[in-house]
Image (cartoon, rainbow, N blue to C red):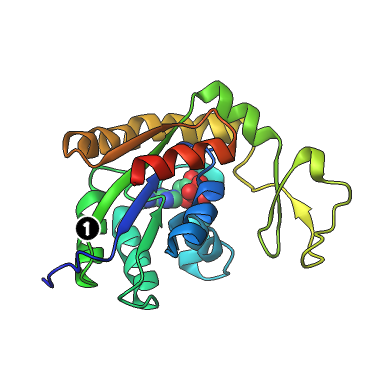
Amino acid sequence: MNTPIESVKNYVLLGPPGSGKSTQATKLKEKLHLAHVDVGSELRRLAESETELGKRIHEVINVKKELVSDGLIGCVVEHVLKGIKSDTGVLVDGAPRRISQVDEVEQALALHERKIAKVIFLDLSLEEAVKRISIRFLCLKCKKPFIKQEVMSLICDQCGGEIGQRQDDTPDGVAKRYEVFMAETRPVIEYFEEQRMLLRIDARMLPDEIFEILMKKLA
Ligand code: AMP
């Protein structure tokens, strides 16, 4: 195994659906010049392909609303890391989400001489998560996020694509994903807390407030 480069900081971002991971990821990437390893988006992209693998992933993430198998996560992280320069820190967004994925992710990072510096956890209640998701829209083409109040037409002002909601963003879908988060990902949070690597952030605040606190905690 290669020795991690200490000066390059790599972070993991975790949180239940609706906790504002994408918003904070965008801000973190810009401020700290990180490359984004967005596991959920990679999986949703694969789920749109007409391949056997794509259909299987679609069934798990959009129909059953469960987590995909662990082996795939290591491969996705490894695949994305291959395209990132070694002197650039990364933000792994959405993995590990099961305790059995901790090794997978750490090994994928270690193959690229990286290790996790901190795990950022955006903490939000189920009630708040359902409220947030019901107003969450996005451009189905370029993925630009919108909130309901901003959607004046169903055409994206950035790329002209159609605006809609994620297939798994129904109230039932959120409740199911939240339940999965509590059952499967809470042990991961507890593990990193024991390792003193966890930064727990109250995600009920406004995005800019959350980011300010996050930056103070990272300093
Ligand atoms: P997200 O965009 O992070 O909400 O992820 C969308 C969906 O992809 C999740 O609801 C899961 O079905 C799947 N997924 C994302 N990350 C993981 C992971 N680390 N392990 C297993 N499944 C995942």
**Percent of width and height locating residue 126:** 51, 24
For residue 219, above or below residue 193: below
Q: Residue at x 41, y 50 (%)?
A: 94
Residue at point 57%, 25% (across, down): 128
**Badge 1 amino acid:** Glu
Give the image location of residue 153, x and y in percent.
89, 51
Q: Is residue 177 above or below residue 6?
A: above
> Which x, y percent locates residue 205?
55, 30
Residue 11, compared with residue 173, is above or below; it is below
Q: Nearer the viewer, residue 215 or 136?
A: 215
* The N terminus - image quarter: bottom left
Of 55 and 16, nearer the camera is: 16
Identify the residue at horizontal 28%, vertical 39% (top origin). Answer: 198
Is residue 43 visible in this depiction of the protein? no
Q: Residues within 10 Å of mark 1 (few under 14, many from 20)?
A: some
Position of 49 compared to 96: left or right?
A: right
Count every numbered label the image shows and give the total.
Answer: 1
Q: Is residue 80 visible?
A: yes
Quarter location, residue 123: top left
The answer to whether residue 132 is left or right of residue 67 is: right
Residue 42 on image: x %, y %: 48, 63
Q: Nearer the viewer, residue 90 or 61?
A: 90
Q: Which residue is mark 1?
A: 106
**Residue 38 left/right relative to 134:** left
Residue 204: quadrant of the picture: top right
In the current view of this chain or complex, which residue is farthest to the top? Answer: 127
Does mark 1 have its CB less than 8 Å from ligand 1? no
